[in-house]
Image (cartoon, grey):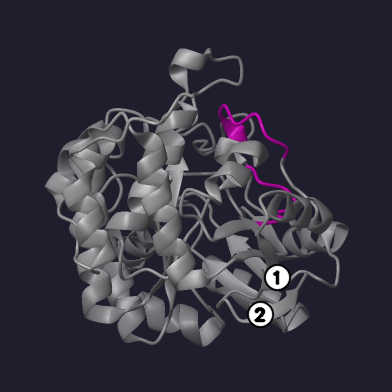
Amino acid sequence: MATLMQDTDLQAIREKVLHGERLTIEDGLTLYNSADLLTVAQLANEVNEQKNGNNVYFIENMYINPTNVCEANCAFCGFKRKPGEEGAYTMHEDEMLQYVSDRWNDNIREFHIVGGHNTDVPFDYYLNTIRALKKNYPHAKVKAYTAAEIEFFARHAGLSMREVLEQLIDAGLDTLPGGGAEILTERYRAKMSPEKASTDEWLEAHEIAHDLGLKTHATMLYGSIDTYEERLIHMDRVRQLQDRTNGFMVFIPLAMQPRKKKAGLERRTSSFDDMRTIAIARLMLDNFQHIKAYWINIGPQLTQMALTFGSSDIHGTLIEERISHSVGALTSQGITRKELIHLIKGANKTPVERDTFYNVVKTY
């Protein structure tokens, strides 16, 4: 009978994990380079079960992208448009509220708002977006504006990032999404997103948000020019901030999407890389409660598999995701509660509907 060959280099890492010792970047490189993916998965699954038992979380949420007009020129983005370019749009209040009304159901608990860095509208536009949603849908939480957007607002409006966040909170902001992080090294950012917030500015925006009482999210966009070491440096940097603030709720590895849906397999991340990265994130980020498998980018079936590779969250219904689908995402733009529950139960896990802050709404 065939048996699995375990990588002996993983034994020291296993001992550290079992004794609750923090893994180093060198340990992470060992995990990335090991041929024994199933042992890596097993370790990550054990850590996740210690933190979250058999529970897997999801939320009913709606994406809103108020504008795709953007000053930045990120190499990976197919969503942005320049002012006057074909396909450019900016929703004003009535349009946005009609957009929401057309897609609304009473189970939605969160608006997830990300848009372009639009210099044609004032900062008040972004404040009023939150005010309008809070006025018309007061029970829904508003997860809005990445740290990169916070830096843009500050620069565009002549304010500090703290002043920007204070005004957004006063308007009704509940939490920041994790986007705009990409890879938190300056080599990567200089090549892929040179006009956006720097590594230090992204981290500073979240640190200020945590100091002001917000719980936030962290992402990592992997699979382009990034090295394994850069991914691990990224994880270590958010881990260090979490040590100081304990303000992050979840870490979300995002698989890079190619620029076109017809792109071949060689332009996409592999399933092995996706699963390994989720598992390594679970093992490296010992001070994060949750690692999210983002079904939009890796597909529902790999998302289901990720639930035994250290993930405890599969995101939400979304209704109409646009950013990943503006490039090469092959998944649907939304998914139903019934389908999310089906995925979780199919992995022999317990589906838990949550709110934005991981409070339990219902266990299935």
Q: Which residue is mark 2?
A: 360
Element at label 1: strand
Q: What is the magenta range?
A: 316-332
Marks 1/2: CA distance? 6 Å
| Kind of residue at disc 2 | Val
Q: Are marks 1 and 2 in contact (CB under 8 Å)?
A: yes
In magenta stretch: residue 327? yes
Percent x, y for residue 60?
73, 64
Residue drawn at x 37%, y 30% as measured from the top left: 75
| Kind of residue at disc 1 | Glu
Q: Nearer the viewer, residue 145 or 345?
A: 345
Percent x, y for residue 292?
50, 56
Q: Nearer the viewer, residue 3 or 190?
A: 3
* Circle number at residue 353: 1
Left or right of 252 in this view: 56: right
**Residue that lies at the very extreme toward the front in this rendered image:** 1
Q: Reply above or below: 194 against 62.
A: above
Q: Reply above or below: 312 against 20.
A: above
Q: Reply above or below: 360 against 311.
A: below
Residue drawn at x 72%, y 84% as measured from the top left: 138
Residue drawn at x 61%, y 81% as measured from the top left: 359
Percent x, y for residue 147?
37, 62
Residue drawn at x 56%, y 37% as measured from the top left: 298
Predominant secondary structure, magenta span: loop
Q: Quadrant of the C terminus?
A: bottom right
